[in-house]
Image (cartoon, rainbow, N blue to C red):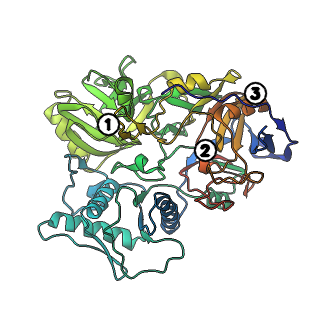
């Protein structure tokens, strides 16, 4: 990343905290929460909470508690607001909720022909096929909404697309997963002209996500807070394999790696004690659906026949892994595809699923996944045939940490940047070494998407923050700073948020010696004993109107 602009924290006056009595839980473990205020010299302030969490009480989980209709309407409203900020006066938004869990296309659409993208990638995931089909229909103006019915209007010469379009619309409409939005308060229309629908910005796939408030009511945990970064901006979910609301980054639950660490970033983990360390894909052993094992070059092989791989190599090896970080060392911009590689077989992998494959390189790189590239001769013709046969019915990939000291990890979550190390600010070092790269213009003035989160900047501006710290006893501190979408805060009423450096100072003052930043902004929210513990910052253009943002994952204290 470029050099960070770190504003020095002011010397604030602190108001008396509001203390909530310690709450005993399982095994008499006490959980406590304090509400505090940080006053700034400019007259503004930041409200924040500090929760003290016993070391063994916290776990992380994904959430998908909302029925499709609630997500469809909420995201449509959010994207409608975004369209108005772009200057559109009467935008039309189409949202659709992808089925969960994702299945092989051959299972969900068994009678349909194989679907290839324009670049030659064969789509194996049902959800990837849904994305590609709807975008193609919208781009070619073949999607219709007439007499309150979704239809495909495909030329007779494009029977392939009529078959796929009809099947996808039937699935989404029968399961109530498709929604058209013309704005809150707009009268329902029997027919809508979709010719001006922008499939890039206004046709929105929705992944696994839910409201924390729903989980708080249903599960009634003692403490609940947002955790993982996720795809939110248009550039984040541009891939056919991606959807708004999808979490990414290392997640370990019950010793099982549920999501891999795509980019070199800090993660907090528990293996008998809580620690913070930097991880990326090169920390994992990978097992393909055929049972073939891969391991990072330079580490011990896990078994006979295992093959070493190299992450983001400038000179390709026999087995290579590529992420969007591939372009950073040489080009100082995120890579959008793998290099041209005649004869290579490339698999696109999201979390623990192979979602597509392509030959000869130049495979598009999703923000929330990676590409495995196999050089000619790496697999025998028999092994290649066996792999392709497996991929028609089994897309599952598994992971194991390569180093023995990591194989005891029971719980982990990746965030970034690291805020504290041994009681001192770690942010300058973390900003220079962790793989965060915002979208920006290149030397030719062309706008290039970065690496998710694509709108994340390490600078001196104040925002809402969700962070986790470790104290000298090995227990955890949740520190959450409230903040409002910039430009919509009301001085004297709304919390102004904090810079990352100020947040690190607050964590150290609260007793943390190690600390990590998690997802923040409009997603920063917490619930304590079923009640909302902070004021969320999502405003959608409406000052003092509070919107709860859907999130895909949570930290939970039962």
- The answer for how far apart the CA atoms under marks 3 and 1 are is 41 Å
Q: Pick whichever of labels 2 and 1 is earlier in the sequence.
A: 1
Name the residue carrying label 1. 371
Marks 2 and 3, how far apart at CA:
26 Å
Rendered residue at 34%/23% (across/down): 330
**Disc 2: CA contacts within 10 A as few (<14), some (14-19) or many (>=20):** many
Q: CA distance from mark 2 to mark 1?
A: 28 Å
**Figure label count:** 3
Q: Is residue 511 visible?
A: no
The residue carrying mark 2 is 520
Judging by the rendered image, the residue that carries numbered circle 3 is 473
Q: Is residue 261 above or below residue 405?
A: below
Label 1: how many Cα within 10 Å (few below 14, some 14–19, many 20+): many
Q: Nearer the viewer, residue 444 or 279?
A: 444
- Indicate which label's residue lies in the foreground, 2 or 3: 2
Q: Residue at x 70, y 46 (%)?
A: 496
Q: Earlier in the sequence, mark 2 or mark 3?
A: 3
Horizontal placement of 473 versus 199: left or right?
right
């Amino acid at each position: 990343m470029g050099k960070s602009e770190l504003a020095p924290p002011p010397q604030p006056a602190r108001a008396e905290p509001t203390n909530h009595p310690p709450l005993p839980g399982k095994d008499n473990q006490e959980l406590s929460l304090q509400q505090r205020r940080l006053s700034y010299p400019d007259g503004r302030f930041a409200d924040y909470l500090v929760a003290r969490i016993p070391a063994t009480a916290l776990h992380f989980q994904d959430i998908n508690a909302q029925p499709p209709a609630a997500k469809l309407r909420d995201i449509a409203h959010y994207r409608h607001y975004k369209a108005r900020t772009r200057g559109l006066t009467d935008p039309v938004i189409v949202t659709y909720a992808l089925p969960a869990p994702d299945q092989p296309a051959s299972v969900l659409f068994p009678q349909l022909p194989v679907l290839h993208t324009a670049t030659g990638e064969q789509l194996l995931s049902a959800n990837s096929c849904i994305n590609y089909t709807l975008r193609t229909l919208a781009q070619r103006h073949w999607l219709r909404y007439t007499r309150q019915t979704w239809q495909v209007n495909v030329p007779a010469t494009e029977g392939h697309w009529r078959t796929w379009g009809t099947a996808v619309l039937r699935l989404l409409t029968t399961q109530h997963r498709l929604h058209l939005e013309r704005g809150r308060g707009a009268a329902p229309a029997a027919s809508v002209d979709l010719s001006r629908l922008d499939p890039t910005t206004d046709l929105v796939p929705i992944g696994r996500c839910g409201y924390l408030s729903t989980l708080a009511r249903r599960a009634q945990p003692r403490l609940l807070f947002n955790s993982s970064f996720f795809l939110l901006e248009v550039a984040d979910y541009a891939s056919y394999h991606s959807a708004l609301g999808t979490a990414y980054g290392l997640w370990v639950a019950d010793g099982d790696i549920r999501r891999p660490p795509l980019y070199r970033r800090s993660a907090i983990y528990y293996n008998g004690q809580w620690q913070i360390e930097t991880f990326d894909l090169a920390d994992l052993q990978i097992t393909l659906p055929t049972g073939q094992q891969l391991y990072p070059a330079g580490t011990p092989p896990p078994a006979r026949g295992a093959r070493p791989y190299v992450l983001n190599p400038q000179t390709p090896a026999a087995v290579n892994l590529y992420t969007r970080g591939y372009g950073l060392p040489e080009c100082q911009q995120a890579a959008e595809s793998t290099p041209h590689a005649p004869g290579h077989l490339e698999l696109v992998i999201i979390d623990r699923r192979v979602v597509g494959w392509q030959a000869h390189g130049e495979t598009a790189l999703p923000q929330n996944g990676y590409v495995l590239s196999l050089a000619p001769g790496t697999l025998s013709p028999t092994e290649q045939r066996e792999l392709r046969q497996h991929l028609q019915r089994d897309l599952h990939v598994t992971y194991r940490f390569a180093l023995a000291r990591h194989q005891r990890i029971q719980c982990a979550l990746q965030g970034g940047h690291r805020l504290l190390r041994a009681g001192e600010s770690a942010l300058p070092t973390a900003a220079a070494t962790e793989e965060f790269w915002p979208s920006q213009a290149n030397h030719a003035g062309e706008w290039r998407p970065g690496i998710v989160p694509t709108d994340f900047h390490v600078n001196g501006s104040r925002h809402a923050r969700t962070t986790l710290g470790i104290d000298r006893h090995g227990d955890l501190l949740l520190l959450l700073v409230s903040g409002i979408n910039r430009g919509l805060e009301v001085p004297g009423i709304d919390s102004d948020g904090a810079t990352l450096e100020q947040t690190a100072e607050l964590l150290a003052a609260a007793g943390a010696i190690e600390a990590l930043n998690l997802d923040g902004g409009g997603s920063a929210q917490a619930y304590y004993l079923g009640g909302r513990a902070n004021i969320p910052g999502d405003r959608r253009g409406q000052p003092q109107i509070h919107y709860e943002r859907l999130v895909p994952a949570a930290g939970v204290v039962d």
